Image (spheres, helix red, strand yellow):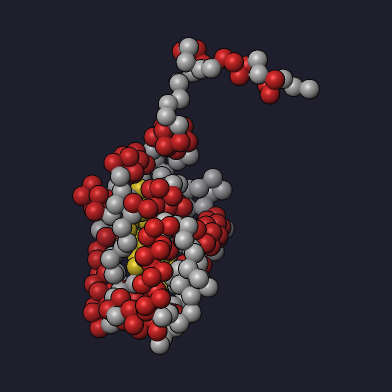
Amino acid sequence: MHRDKKGGVLPKRIIVVRHGESQGNLDTAAYTTTPDHKIQLTPQGITQARLAGARIRHVIAGDGPNWRVYFYVSPYDRTRSTLREIGRSFSKKRVIGVREECRIREQDFGNFQVQEHMNSIKETRQRFGRFYYRFPEGESAADVFDRVSSFLESLWRDIDMNRLNHDPANDLNLIIVSHGLASRVFLMKWFKWTVEQFELLNNFGNSEFRVMQLGSGGEYSLAVHHTDKELLEWGLSPDMIADQKWRAHASKGAWNDQSSWYLDTFFDHLPDSDDDGSVDKEDETSPLSVHS
């Protein structure tokens, strides 16, 4: 059992799930007549969500009898329907609670969408960059990042203050039912991925999920449950995969000291110390370094 700095019991897993296949996934013309938040699951999407629930239960139940789940869900109809189907795999005894969370909703693409206009807009987004491009009357991925970051702060307060009413005798598993982009942004924020690394990521498939599992040292990692092959298929670079493997065994809070690859993302090379002769000594006599 791991506790955070304030003494709260950390979830054993945080599982991020994308909704099942929706009418909008099947035919983008659905967005021209139906508000995005009202788009429904297809029959195939309902089946996918139900199978995802069985798979998630299999992952969690492998630890033994002492476990519980708590759900966060986007308010959109397709995510709520996905949650209902996932919930068929769990009894009331296993579910501590559920919370609808607006901050993990889908990226806002504007109101009713004109299909030909959206095709042109998405081509522009590819040239501009997926993270920064803001849809007219809608959001950019950067906007979604801001609200997902706010959600994460609330999630940690829920854990610290035991607002989830979790009994420490049971392993806690948080399940977040959301959307493709919001889920990728959630992982980006959690693992401190750069914008460049975010752009590498592939979208979740319908009802696909990612398992962030607590490693032996208290850090969360995708590499505890998932294979290298899966991580590569999802678009993680070799450096990102190496970081996930390190997290699987790292001591909590050691990331800044140990993840040298992250510094290398911003600097060509930093010497290990000032004594190896490669540090520019001129800065010591620069007028900018003289204190008035």
Q: Is residue 216 shown above or below 287?
A: below
What residue is drawn where x is 35% and y is 40%?
Answer: 243
Name the quadrant of the C terminus.
top right
Question: 1 or 148: nearer the eye?
Answer: 148
**Which residue is at a point 41% across and 44% down the rendered structure image?**
218
Task: State which quadrant residue 119 falls in.
Answer: bottom left
Q: What percent of the width, then of the height, locates residue 153? A: 55, 57
Q: Is residue 68 above or below residue 199?
A: below
Dividing the picture into quadrants, the one containing residue 38 is bottom left
How many marks on residues?
0
Q: Is residue 75 above or below residue 150?
A: below
Q: Which residue is pictured at 29% across the width and 69% down the height?
A: 207
Residue placed most toward the observer, 93 or 236: 236
Taking the view exactly as shown, the residue that stands out farthest to the bottom is 33
- Find residue 219 and report its horizontal and vertical position in percent: 41, 44
Where residue 89 sits: x, y (%)? 29, 73
Question: Which residue occupies 42% across, 56% down?
Answer: 129
* Image position, residue 46 (x, y; %): 27, 79
The answer to whether one can see residue 41 in this image is no
Looking at the picture, tell me which residue is in the foreground, 164 or 107.
Answer: 107
Q: Is residue 222 above or below residue 243?
A: below
Residue furthest toward the right?
Answer: 292
Residue 273 makes an appearance in the image = yes
